[in-house]
């Protein structure tokens, strides 16, 4: 059974930092691309999940949303089956539930339907 478990969410003031982690089990981790998506308050429909950052199976390629450029970075450790999202200079508009996703992505890495497995999400709240 595949499991993706996110951790590291919480409440922070604007300008602060958080590191989200996602631990995966039950899959050949190094074969999968990984990504972080987020869902803001009031946008509960799955198709309204917003792409944040992705990283290829070997870490050689990353892709990010314009809204997080220069503030967020992604990293993965295939030996530990983990992927991290490092978030700096957080803004109130970053407030959302953040989801980790894994998939054998053959299309654009920013499309949610390309990812087969999803975690339950972790809440990030940024206050002004």
Image (spheres, grey):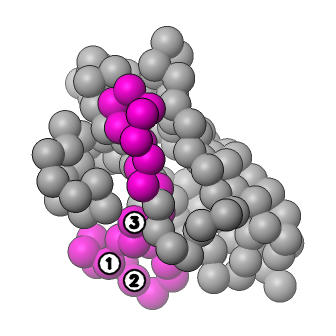
Mark 2 and mark 1 in contact (Cβ < 8 Å)? Answer: yes
Residue at mark 1 = 48
Residue appearing at x 73%, y 77% in the figure: 91
- Image position of 57 with respect to 67: above or below: above
Q: Which residue is most to the top?
A: 79
Mark 3 to mark 2: distance in Å? Answer: 13 Å
Mark 2 and mark 3 in contact (Cβ < 8 Å)? Answer: no
Q: Which residues are magenta?
A: 38-63
- Determine the image quadrant of residue 10: bottom right
- Is any part of residue 116 visible from this angle? no
Q: Classify residue 75 as left or right of residue 111.
A: right
Q: Classify residue 65 as left or right of residue 113.
A: right
| Image location (x, y in percent) of residue 72 | 64, 57
- Image position of 26 with respect to 43: above or below: above
Residue at mark 2 = 43
Q: Which tag, 3 or 2, sits closer to the chain's start?
A: 2
Residue at mark 3 = 51
Q: Residues within 10 Å of mark 1 (few under 14, many from 20)?
A: some
């Amino acid at each position: 059974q595949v499991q993706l478990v996110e951790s590291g969410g919480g409440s922070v003031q604007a300008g602060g930092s958080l590191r989200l982690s996602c631990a995966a089990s039950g899959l050949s981790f190094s074969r999968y691309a990984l990504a972080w998506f987020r869902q803001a308050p009031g946008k509960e429909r799955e198709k309204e999940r917003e792409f944040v950052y992705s990283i290829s199976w070997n870490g050689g390629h990353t892709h990010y949303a314009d809204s997080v450029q220069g503030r967020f970075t992604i990293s993965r450790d295939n030996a530990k089956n983990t992927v991290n999202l490092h978030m700096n200079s957080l803004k109130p508009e970053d407030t959302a539930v953040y989801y980790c996703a894994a998939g054998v992505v053959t299309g654009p890495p920013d499309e949610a339907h390309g990812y087969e497995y999803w975690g339950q999400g972790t809440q990030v709240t940024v206050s002004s």
